[in-house]
Image (cartoon, rainbow, N blue to C red):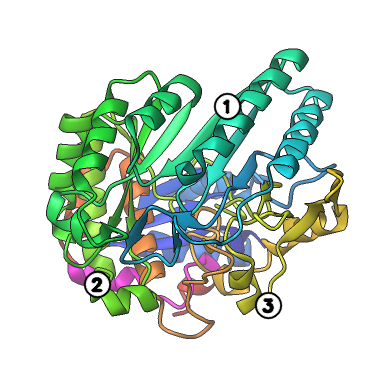
Amino acid sequence: MILDTVFVIPILDKYLLYSPKHVFIALINKQAVAEIYNILATNTTSKHHKYLSPIIEVINQPVHKDIGALKGGFNPCFLGIVLSRRCNMKCSYCNFEPNTSPKEKVDLDKALALIDYFVNLKKKQGHSSCAIEFFGGEPFVEDNLISIIVHRSRYLGSMLGINPCFSAVTNGYLTPKQRVFIEDYFDSIVVSCDGFMQHHNRNRKLVNGKSSYRKVFATMKQFSKADIEFAIRCCVTKDSVHDMADMAEWFCTEFKPDLVNFEVLTENAETIEAGISAPAPDDFAINLVKSWRILEKHNVKYSYAPVSLQNLNISTCPVGNDALILHPDGVLASCYLGKDEWQNERIDFSLGEVGSDGVVSIDIDKVFGMREHVQNKPICDDCFCRFSCAGNCHVNTLVASKGEEKSSFCKQTRIITACELLHNMNLLDLEQQFLANHEALHLLNSANSDKLAKYVCQ
C-alpha cells in the first residue's frame, strides 16, 4: 500500500514527508499532510491538489528502490577472523580476557585453509580484490598469527590476481614494531580512543589498572602521518557527552583522521560495576550532530551505523550480508560476537565450520536463513528509520517491544536521523532550531507510528 511506504516526521511546526523507497523527501505543513493523506487514501482530488500534485505524482510512481534479502549463491562481503578473545587492556565496559588468559585462539592451519578458500572463491566470482578483517579481543595480541595470515593472503592473491585488503579495530596499545607492520601491510585501521585523557583513562585502563593513554596517543599520532585509512572510534558516556564537540575538534587538529565514529556506551554488568553510564538520548543526539558539523568543516568523514541513509538496509551489521567470520573454535558464523551471546538470545548465527582436515564447509541453507532472519523485525515496521537503522544489532536488541515506550537507543537514533535528513536538504538553520527545542524532540519520539497511513489518525 502506498500509504505504508511514506513516513511523516514532525519538525517544530513543519513536517518532513519522507519515502526512502521513492528516494523522496519534502518539508510541508500540517494541512498538506492531511490533504496528501486524503488524496492518496480516497484517490480523489482537493482544492489544493494543483499545489500538491508534484508530491502525489512522485509517491504514486513505482518505487525507485526496493529492498529484500540478498539473492543468488553465497557471496561473502568480507572474511573476518576472530583471533582470540584476549586483550592487553581491561576497559570498563568490556569482558574480554587478559592476554595472559589460557583461553583458546584461532587455529593457524584452519585460518590458512579458510584464506585459501576465500581468495579462490573471490577469484571464481570475478572479483579483483577481497576484504579481510581481524577481530578480538585485541587482535594484535596475536600479532604472529596476523603476520602469517597477511603474508599467506598476499602470496595467494599475487598468484591469482586478487588484491587482499586488510583492516582491524585495535585499542591502540601497540608496540612501535606493530605500528610499522600495520602501516606497511594494512589498508585501514580503527583505533579506539575515548577522547580527552580524563575520559579515556577512566574507561580504558590496562589490565594492571594503569593508564593506557600515552601509548594510544602515540599510536594515533603515528597513524595520522601514515599512508593508511585511519579512523577513530570513541565511546561516549554520561561524563563525556558534553565534550563531544570539543573532542571532535581535537581529533581533527591533533590526529587528522579520515573518519571519526562516536558510539554511545552500551550499559552492562561491567559498566554498572565501574560506575559509568550512558548519556541521555537527547544529550547524545544533540552533541553528536554538533560534532558531525565540526568534522565536516575539517573534511573528516563521520559514521554512526544506525544512521545510514546512502542505501536501503535490512541489516547494518555483518549478519544477513553474507559475511564469513571464523571464530577461535573453528566455527564459521555471520556475527563476530561470542556464541554464548547468540545462545542467550536463542539465535544460531553459525554458517559452517573449518574441519580439522582443513575442509571448509558452508551450510547454504543457513546462509539463506540469515538473509531472511534480518527481515523479521516487526517492531520496527512503523518507524521512519526502518530502512536506515534496520533495528541495529540482531543480538543485543536495543529497541523496545511493540507498544512500549521507545528505548533510549531508538530515541537518539530517530533524532539523529531526522537531523541528517534536514542536513541533506541543506536546512541547517532548521536543524539547529529543532535540536534546541526539547519539546520538538519529545514530539518526534511520541508517535506510535510514523507511517502516513496511521500518522493522521493519531
Tell me, yes or no, if residue 11 can be seen here: yes
Q: Which disc, if any, is residue 276? A: 2
CA gap, disc 3 and disc 2: 29 Å
Residue, disc 1 = 165
- The residue nearer to you, when weighing 187 against 180, is 180
Residue position marked by numbered label 3 in the rendering:
346
Reply above or below: 261 against 278.
Answer: above
In the image, what residue occupies the spot 51% across and 34% down?
A: 167
As measured in the structure, the alpha-carbon distance from the residue carrying label 1 to the one carrying label 3 is 34 Å
Q: Please tell me which of labels 1 and 3 falls first in the chain.
A: 1
Q: Earlier in the sequence, mark 1 or mark 2?
A: 1
Mark 1 nearby-residue class (10 Å; few <14, some 14–19, many ≥20): some
Give amino acid for label 3. Answer: Arg
- What span is colored magenta in the figure? 438-453
Label 2 sits on what residue type?
Answer: Ile
* Horizontal arrangement in the rendering, residue 52 relative to residue 272 (left or right): right
Q: Residues within 10 Å of mark 3 (few under 14, many from 20)?
A: few
